[in-house]
Amino acid sequence: MRAWYKYFIETNNAGQNACAQDVFAYQSAQMDGYAIDPAYSSAEAFFDRYFLGPDNFRYQVYEQAAKRYCNPNDRILSVGSGRCATELKLQASGYRIDCSDLKKPACIAATKKLFPELSFRELDSLSEYGRQNYDAILSFGVFFTFDDQRGRAFFDHMASFLKPGGRIVMDPGGAAENFLTRFLDDILLPTEAKIIAARKARREARPQKVVRRHHGFRQKDDDIIQLAGAAGFDLLARETSYSEPEFRRSRLFELLADAAPAAESMAHGLFGSLAHNIRLMVFKKTDCPGRHPE
Ligand SMILES: C[S@@+](CC[C@H](N)C(=O)[O-])C[C@H]1O[C@@H](n2cnc3c(N)ncnc32)[C@H](O)[C@@H]1O
């Protein structure tokens, strides 16, 4: 596990090198503030904007995975649901899902108007215990916010929500810890941010600061599997794919790929799954009485 930082260019230096203290505020800002827009005019417009299309490829992968590993009559809990796009799509196909997040995202009232059957509650997956009454848990793009200690706690808490034999279908969020993501996060992206800030400062004739914020953690698959195992989960399946490869975070790479589209497939050929930002993992709760607090 390695701390994962992102770099922001800001004129006002107030938050320089600040850590993201309020996880929900930081994560929701990363997700467009979970704001409402004209897509909240109809269910069709909502799915067009937030589920369909290449930008939302990861949600389509999640939906397919949930359909493979859950049954429509399962009782399903989604943790860290955010805008609930995948969950609402599954619900439209007959799945019963209780959505949740640390706090109510700004869009929830508008979402409920569009989808009155939406079930949503505030739930901190690291502090609440359940009553072993769910068949499956969905958790997409949440686990990367946890260090190892919290990761272990996450699985303990999830076990308490699941019936024996229950499954977790999850994507930790982002590509794994490896030399490529280390190079991107710790060398290329901060260097690019400094160059962009210097150019912006010259263009706008006012100082620009590069602000480093703690985004989360890069974890290896094996480390996640080990943490899950310690809480009584067996790995059922694992697969990777990508919507926006991690190199796309680099402005330099983006320019290169736009000028020569072959560069992107070459990079994939070269680095394979190292840059894959979708990492589906499916775990099954084993029968370990007494291991899962209620
Ligand atoms: C990157 S967003 C992903 C949202 C949504 N699942 C998606 O894929 O679009 C991560 C979400 O996880 C939530 N989260 C972070 N820590 C959490 C915790 N301990 N318990 C529940 N949710 C958490 C954040 O509030 C945020 O909404």
Image (cartoon, rainbow, N blue to C red):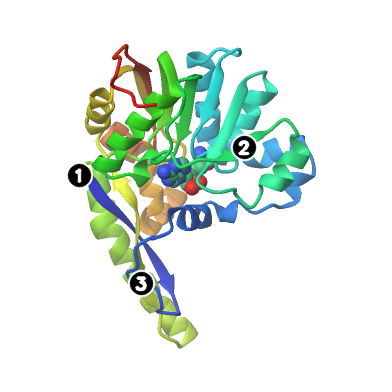
Residue at image x 22%, y 41%? 178
* 3 or 1: mark nearer the eye: 3
- Local crowd at mark 1 within 10 Å, few (<14), some, or many (≥20)? few
Q: Quadrant of the N terminus?
A: top left
Q: Is residue 78 left or right of residue 125?
A: right
CA distance for labels 3 and 2: 37 Å
Rendered view: 148 above or below 158 = below
Q: Which residue is mark 2?
A: 120
Between discs 3 and 2, the one toward the N terminus: 2
CA distance for labels 3 and 1: 24 Å
Rendered view: 227 above or below 162 = below
> How far from the left and from the top, in percent, is residue 164?
40, 13
Three-letter amino acid code at the position of disc 3: Val
Rendered view: 95 above or below 199 = above
Between discs 1 and 2, the one toward the N terminus: 2
The quarter holding residue 49 reads top right
Between discs 3 and 1, the one toward the N terminus: 1
> How far from the left and from the top, in percent, is residue 157?
37, 32
Three-letter amino acid code at the position of disc 1: Phe
Q: Which residue is mark 1?
A: 179
Instruction: Give the residue at the far left of this rendering.
Output: 179
Cβ of mark 2 under 8 A from ligand 1: no
> Does residue 274 appear in this view?
no
CA distance for labels 1 and 2: 39 Å
- Local crowd at mark 3 within 10 Å, few (<14), some, or many (≥20)? many
Mark number, residue 210: 3
